Image (cartoon, coloured by chain):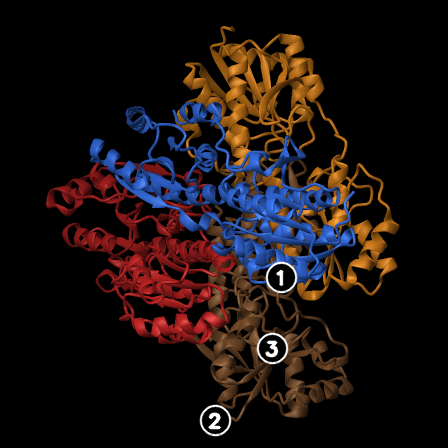
Chain colours: A blue, B red, C brown, D orange
Amino acid sequence: MSNIKNIAVFTSGGDAPGMNAAIRAVVRTGLYYNLNVFGIGRGYDGMVHDDIFAMDAKSVANIIQRGGTILKTARSEEFRTVEGRRRAFENLQKKGIDGLVAIGGDGTFTGASKFIEEYNIPIIGLPGTIDNDLAGTDFTIGYDTAINTVIEAVDKIRDTAESHDRVFVVEVMGRDSGLIALRSGISVGAECVLIPEIKVDYEAMMDRLDRTRKNKASRVIIVAEGDDAGAFAVAERIKERFPHYDLRVSILGHIQRGGSPSCMDRVLASRLGVAAVEALMEGRRGEMAGLIHSKVEFTPFEKAIKHIGAVNDNLLRMVDILSS
Amino acid sequence: MSNIKNIAVFTSGGDAPGMNAAIRAVVRTGLYYNLNVFGIGRGYDGMVHDDIFAMDAKSVANIIQRGGTILKTARSEEFRTVEGRRRAFENLQKKGIDGLVAIGGDGTFTGASKFIEEYNIPIIGLPGTIDNDLAGTDFTIGYDTAINTVIEAVDKIRDTAESHDRVFVVEVMGRDSGLIALRSGISVGAECVLIPEIKVDYEAMMDRLDRTRKNKASRVIIVAEGDDAGAFAVAERIKERFPHYDLRVSILGHIQRGGSPSCMDRVLASRLGVAAVEALMEGRRGEMAGLIHSKVEFTPFEKAIKHIGAVNDNLLRMVDILSS
Amino acid sequence: MSNIKNIAVFTSGGDAPGMNAAIRAVVRTGLYYNLNVFGIGRGYDGMVHDDIFAMDAKSVANIIQRGGTILKTARSEEFRTVEGRRRAFENLQKKGIDGLVAIGGDGTFTGASKFIEEYNIPIIGLPGTIDNDLAGTDFTIGYDTAINTVIEAVDKIRDTAESHDRVFVVEVMGRDSGLIALRSGISVGAECVLIPEIKVDYEAMMDRLDRTRKNKASRVIIVAEGDDAGAFAVAERIKERFPHYDLRVSILGHIQRGGSPSCMDRVLASRLGVAAVEALMEGRRGEMAGLIHSKVEFTPFEKAIKHIGAVNDNLLRMVDILSS
Amino acid sequence: MSNIKNIAVFTSGGDAPGMNAAIRAVVRTGLYYNLNVFGIGRGYDGMVHDDIFAMDAKSVANIIQRGGTILKTARSEEFRTVEGRRRAFENLQKKGIDGLVAIGGDGTFTGASKFIEEYNIPIIGLPGTIDNDLAGTDFTIGYDTAINTVIEAVDKIRDTAESHDRVFVVEVMGRDSGLIALRSGISVGAECVLIPEIKVDYEAMMDRLDRTRKNKASRVIIVAEGDDAGAFAVAERIKERFPHYDLRVSILGHIQRGGSPSCMDRVLASRLGVAAVEALMEGRRGEMAGLIHSKVEFTPFEKAIKHIGAVNDNLLRMVDILSS
């Protein structure tokens, strides 16, 4: 058992729906165990610049349903320097903070590891990123909401595609990972899904586009932004081969990050938020709390850090079968 | 009173939410008055190629809530030729069709005018376009849904903007008209709205961006696609002036067309669909049914055709007042 | 021109989506004209109990998209007494408040009239109620959102009704007015709509239910809560006549009040909020700002007070035609 | 390896979002493997009454995003009789159907077991029910959508609760299981969650309501419909104890069944639909395909049948911690 008395929570990296639910869970759990709880604004940058403030139960009232993060998030060049981290630690010391909960992704945990190494301060991480690209958890906070946002958008595009017998190439988020593309592609009945993990077989794609013509007025191709080509390049190739296609490109972009979190993200964020505080109290540090097979599990930061899992072959095969 | 016995309905131009509600109203009203009702697939193109089929009450069951158009829509080069229109008319004659309801925009009514001129067939038009750029109706079918889609998307973007203290330039539809930009801009609390009708005063925009910084973490600029610059060009200028801004661009694109129609669009489409059939029965032709001050009014096609109304100055002024 | 320097805004009566947009518009417009702006918590009750506080541009940042009212609303028995109103006036005087904007309905304006009569304080009203039952405006703030909430809910119910060939009786809000029932009924393709303004012809309803059976698997009857029977009583009668129907009742209830306001409600609230402050500055008082034929118009409180308009016969007739 | 050539798919029991995605996956997978695929209307009733029809790829185009079930569902008293099942089997034989996919719940699988016992026909089941009350799968098809529908509705109610400082008792579906109540309760930040699995400690509830008053303007209590009391009875007790509370009841009812399926339900339904057909081809029968720890697993019908799992204590404990 640790003697932690004062904890602080912050969000870092790109915002993700469910971050507020996680913040709320950390704050309320801390208070439940009679800890003092602080919030840090704008991630590591706020730590360096002393943007640290007490939080109570009311500070997190009525935020569980809000997208974004009330604590804000920002890049911090200064925290990457020895001097920056020294100032950050001094600011925490002034408030007597002896435990941290860091909500973010890959980069967030890299920073946290460095900080622990230098100052031996307990930090527990929570996976807050829409990309679902972290080892140590089946799902990251924000991923489920993001794919639901994608399918709502593509359902709308399908209305137009059907009305005009059109082919749409839709680019979704996922710089290093095709997970958003793959799951949303299956969900919208996409005819093809292109992801960075798999080299695109353009001939197969063209064949499928041609073959599915007889059954389907419209066709939708989902491209992960990290795919080597990108949606416009893919559209260019299709245009070359099938110049008569009525072809359009849509880049979904930033709408994928925001919005009210789904039930799954709210429950996930709440469970992991409770677990993070209890882990700090049990003396854990340098680990990310994740959900594996519906159970909370802890993974050391060095293993949680960016992990491009093997793509589930079954899901890819399903795109073939179901769009036939 | 006319002796119309067989009517047909078709959609033409870009699809718009509420077109299905309009089709349903035309079909059900025709049946109610014991007319035979036909549908024509893919607009004028289906007329030329004899894609004409009988419809009954069941054909339009459970479609009022669907986006797009079950009758599909397409461009028709052939209908622009004398020969194409001749074939179209012959196809209608084969089925004994003696009245048409054309759902679409500017181009749809131009085609209809030509067709009436040559073949003297009664046609009533319904304003189906998200752009709200037709004279003769306060609102076009699809406009209300489109602006609601825009504000839902920008609300999501605002979550991210707030979390990162970012400036977003968001491009919305409206090639010739800033109406979507203006109403959605007011609705999302945009700091600036740029529309094609008004020459952009970049200095004023930069001033406002600078001035609103102290009160607002995030700023959102809405740009109509028809604006001379476009979102990327606007972003470029801002970047030059305020290189330190965390600035992003989002092009909403095709998601603005689809989706389940709003209550307003469903009621509007239903009212005008009923009115169109009754107008044909009363011997009207060559007119568009619209809603002006909550009453159905008819406007000759030549006057309904594309009309860029004066921008409501009060709305523009409101952007200034409310984003201060 | 008046010499108003300090204004206050409050919400009263049932909450309605768009109230926050109206509050924001009042506050920002006041600041734009260099007035001091105060908020009053919990309507007249907060006035009596001195729950009055300064507001600035930041107080209303990022609320335009939120349902409910950040100023809260409550009943106030005390304000109905001479003594209560005296205390309320004294509290306003202490802050030097010389103009009020009251957002609410019928009861709100009755209270305001009494207050003006006794203390001669300028008050402008804004129509904030989902019921759309006020004279002096084509639409009240919240009405458009409420009917959209209704149709989203009934679209879901229709999925189940279609799957089971079921008849649903759905009760929607509207104690004295069938406007929500009528517009939402048309929008969901309801087979019957029962409203308090029109005596129900049960025989006609039974006939229609029976007649529409052949074309339609499912039937939906929309009942306004103010209808003499209520949904359960209507269902009872149907059950007697058609005991073999698979019949269900759904009371939509409180979900109809909340939610993010629609574009129309946000624009309406923003326009009227600007107009209210400018009206106070021009020396107006005792009037409600409304939108009639897309123009802001002012109506004396005594005329704005609860008005059950004649039902639009065309809309009722449409239910008959379109559900055939 | 089996020699199955002709399969049929049907839905039975209450409709659930994602059933259409499952139907689509079964049909498309069957066609992919060159099987003939039939649909059966209205579940077992359609089997008895020969409502059986061929399906092709087009029959299931553009349905993945639709709620309800295009095959409809119904109770069948006749199928419970020996004679009824005999006729059902004869109807299948006439079409040469030698494999079935049954989408539904507990009752569906009981019928299927009986049918296999008597006629030795291969049947694979898919868990299609919003209640998530089946052993053999972590999630049933429809559950994720239903809880998201619940939280969207309660988020709206929270807007009103906050505006009026009100206490709401909200009843959600779940006759035998509190799973919907528990997960949605955590997601909306409910102050109390009452479920049939756990005897309600009213004193604790009253204490919490009283205690949370200082931090929270509004309180929301989620009650599963299967709870011994029901929402009105719970409200009655609260009213007795705290007569001054502004207290309201909302029964969410049938809106919880419909709506466009979530991404999770679409992917789940698609995966299990593919697996069901492949299982039939591999010679499996009398089993339900489910997803356990992200892998497809098969469970004999007699074990899949209604299972009220132990409630996850951690989730219940979280309600206590997070609403403090």
Task: Tell me the residue that label 2 is attached to.
Answer: C1
Query: Label 3 sits on what residue type?
Result: Ile
User: Who comes first in sequence, dot 3 or dot 2?
Assistant: 2
Q: Quadrant of the N terminus of chain B?
A: bottom left
What is the secondary structure assignment of the residue under circle 1?
strand
What is the secondary structure assignment of the residue under circle 3?
loop
Query: Label 1 sits on what residue type?
Result: Ile
**From the viewer's perspective, is B250 left or right of D278?**
left
Q: Relative to C57, is B308 above or below?
A: above
Residue C66: x %, y % from top left: 56, 62
Please name which of the two marks, 1 or 3, marks the residue nearer to the observer: 1
Q: Residues within 10 Å of mark 3 (few under 14, many from 20)?
A: many
Q: What label does residue C305 carry, if any?
A: 3
Q: Given contact means CB atoms under 8 Å apart, are the residues at marks 3 and 2 in contact?
A: no
Determine the CA span between mark 2 and mark 1: 48 Å
Q: Which chain does tag 2 point to?
A: C
Query: Label 2 sits on what residue type?
Result: Met
Q: Which chain does tag 1 point to?
A: A
Residue B175: x %, y % from top left: 27, 58
Residue C9: x %, y % from top left: 60, 78
Q: Between residues C23 and B145, which one lies in front from this camera angle? A: C23
What is the secondary structure assignment of the residue under circle 2?
loop
Q: Relative to D306, is B240 above or below?
A: below
Residue D245: x %, y % from top left: 80, 63
Q: Is residue C136 visible?
A: no
Q: Relative to C225, is B208 above or below?
A: below
Q: What label does residue A52 carry, if any?
A: 1
Determine the CA span between mark 1 and mark 3: 51 Å
Q: Quadrant of residue B195?
A: bottom left
Please name which of the two marks, 3 or 2, marks the residue nearer to the observer: 2
Q: Is residue A156 visible?
A: yes
